[in-house]
Image (tube, rainbow, N blue to C red):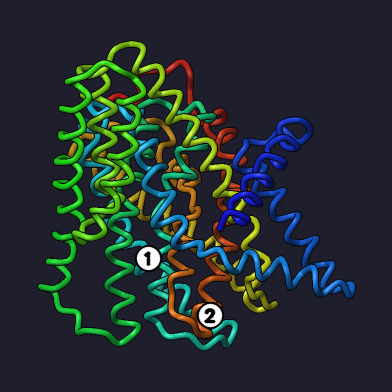
Amino acid sequence: MLDIVALLVTLTALFSYINHRFIKLPTTIGVMALAMLLSLILMSLGELGYAPIEQRAEAIIGGIDFNQVLMQGMLSLLLFAGALHVDLEELARKKWPIGILATVGVVASTFLVGIASWLVLNFLFGISIALLYCLLFGALISPTDPIAVLGILKSAKAPKSLEIKIAGESLFNDGVAVVVFAILLGLAVGGEAVTPGGVALLFVEEALGGIVFGLAIGYAAYRLLKSIDRYDVEILITLALVLGGYALAIHLHVSGPIAMVVAGLMIGNHGRSLAMSDATREHLDTFWELIDEILNAVLFVLIGLEVVILTFTRDYLLASLMIIPIVLLVRLACVGLPVSIMRRRFGFAFSPHAVKIMTWGGLRGGISVALALSLPTGPERQIVLALTYIVVLFSILVQGLTVGRLIEATVVPANPGAGNP
């Protein structure tokens, strides 16, 4: 484990330096692109007769459980760090748009993407795959990844109103998607029968349980922070809140991601304003910003390296290229229809071109790859994993690099009030 961690951190530092010094892309995108380049070089060496080098690389990367590293490790820290700087009052004002997009939007997208993918794979490419596995693909590819989204939004100058909607949706929709994914996975592997009552109970346990648990541990940490004024101890309390809280959430069978978002919102708003001195706020922000930047870079290096152990065929690649626009069109429909209804029926205001920006800015990332890697071993897993990886790469490399330009081209600076409510 020490060797693997040392290798990942060293590669991340090297790629970050090369990107900053010569390439000058956003850090996460630059390091992922360089990691992919390294993966392609290693694969090429295997084709040129240097098989031991490629095999050694496959053994090292294959020994990293991406699902465990992200879902049981990095995710808690990254979600807390992301939520720490979200304005709770602004989030509360946008609760209905965010809530609808994070629930109804994700469920609708799951079924639309799943059915469309099943039709494309079975009837256009002759790739035999059950509808349930296509629905699983729909569930894992539908949520926008908070890690990828928040990283890009830092550099894109979106209107504040639109930024809070995109960030809020991305922070909460992965919790809903994980519940949907778990239900469909139970059906796919032939486990216990899934009933409407069981689905409702699972949703209450995971989603609502995560909210309540996040409030409880967030309030406990807030009381501890308020009782002292020593920044090193207070930072340690927030670290314990994240790591200990996430571990306990898993054991209690409530949503750890949702709990971390709720706890981060509480500490970042009430804790920051009522329980911290100026010195503590400065040190806390610096600490969590560093955690966020470092883990983001390591995560995207991991995504780039995973290509070494994936199986791609010509049909998988062609099917993926066809499914990319399907995913985008479904995203457009699942954003555009609710936004249109909320505008016309309920009077909610959205920034100009909000649908375009929310569609193109809805990035997929490491969470989708991690969920795909959690599927049971079999031919369906290889198909879903290949599709997921190509869609995620397109999302990060193409959408991530161009969403800033889209915002610059569509947002009208002279209309600062367009994004109110």
Residue at the limit of the structure toward the top, as seen here = 278
Question: Which residue bears the numbered disc 1?
Answer: 139
Q: Residues within 10 Å of mark 2 (few under 14, many from 20)?
A: many
Front one among 218 and 378: 218
Q: Is residue 132 above or below residue 261?
A: below
Q: Residues within 10 Å of mark 1 (few under 14, many from 20)?
A: many
**At 36% from the left edge and 47% from the top edge, which residue is drawn?**
76
Q: Position of residue 159 (x, y in %)?
A: 42, 26
Residue 47 in sight in this render: yes
Q: Which amino acid type corresponds to the residue marked 2 in the rendered image?
A: Leu
Q: Position of residue 131 (x, y in %)?
A: 40, 82
Question: Which residue bears the numbered disc 2?
Answer: 121
Q: Is residue 389 above or below residue 409?
A: below
Q: Is residue 184 above or below residue 163?
A: below
In the shown orientation, is residue 336 left or right of residue 400?
Answer: left
Helix, strand or loop for disc 2: helix
Which disc, if any, is residue 10? none
In the shown orientation, is residue 341 left or right of residue 410?
Answer: left
